[in-house]
Every structure is written in C-alpha cells, then in structure tokens.
Image (cartoon, rainbow, N blue to C red):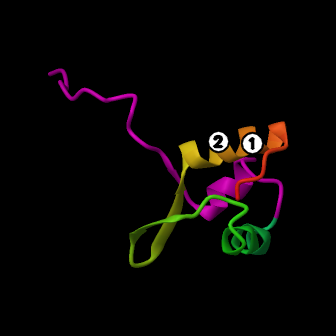
Amino acid sequence: MRNNVSYSPSLEKYLRLRQLIQGGYVPFAPATVWRKVADKSFPQPVRLSAGVTAWRESDVLDWQRRQAQGVELK
C-alpha cells in the first residue's frame, strides 16, 4: 500500500544546538552561540517546548550568507 502523504518543500527545518555545531553551521562553541544570541549577532532561537530550543535552518542559512557578505545581523 502506498502512502499518499505529500510533503511541502516549504516545511521549516529546525536545528538544535548540537546540530548547529556538529553540522558545521557555526564555527564556534556552544557558549559563543549563546553569547551571540544575547547580543543579537546570531539568529534568535525558537522555543519548541519547555525543554527544547532550536533555530530555524532558514534563519541560520541567512546568517551564513550575511557573514559571507560582511553584513551584520543587527
């Protein structure tokens, strides 16, 4: 039996802190990610539940593009 569920390419992917670092999205340590979040030089995370915080992949990819172009997030 074939599954007729269709997936939209517009579905957002979320990245946990470990995925940001181990996946090569950011070249720094967890403490630096949080410091950059606090000073608003890195995208703000989204609270998915009481114990789960993640970043939208699209926000992180946009941040990477801005970094490559030398544009500040602020």
Give whichever of 15, 67 is nearer the camera.
67
Marking on residue 62: 2
Left or right, residue 70 beside residue 45: right
Q: Which residue lies furthest to the top in this view?
A: 2
Residue 40 within the magenta-colored segment of the rendering:
no
Which residue occupies 83% across, 54% down?
27
Amino acid residing under circle 2: Asp
**Could you say where residue 66 lies in the image, as x and y percent from the top left?**
74, 42
**Could you say where residue 3 lies in the image, as x and y percent from the top left?**
19, 26
Instruction: Please determine whether, in this image, residue 51 is positioned above or below residue 11.
Output: below
Instruction: Please determine whether, in this image, residue 24 is positioned above or below residue 48.
Output: above
| CB atoms of marks 1 and 2 within 8 Å | yes
Which residue occupies 68% across, 75% down?
38
Magenta highlight range = 1-28
Q: For the residue carrying disc 1, how many other residues have a C-alpha within 10 Å: few (<14), some (14-19), or many (20+)?
A: few
Q: Name the residue tied to disc 1.
A: 66
Q: Distance between the residues labelled 1 and 2?
A: 6 Å
**Could you say where residue 51 lies in the image, as x and y percent from the top left?**
44, 77
* SS of the residue under disc 2: helix
Quadrant location of the C terminus in the rendered image:
bottom right
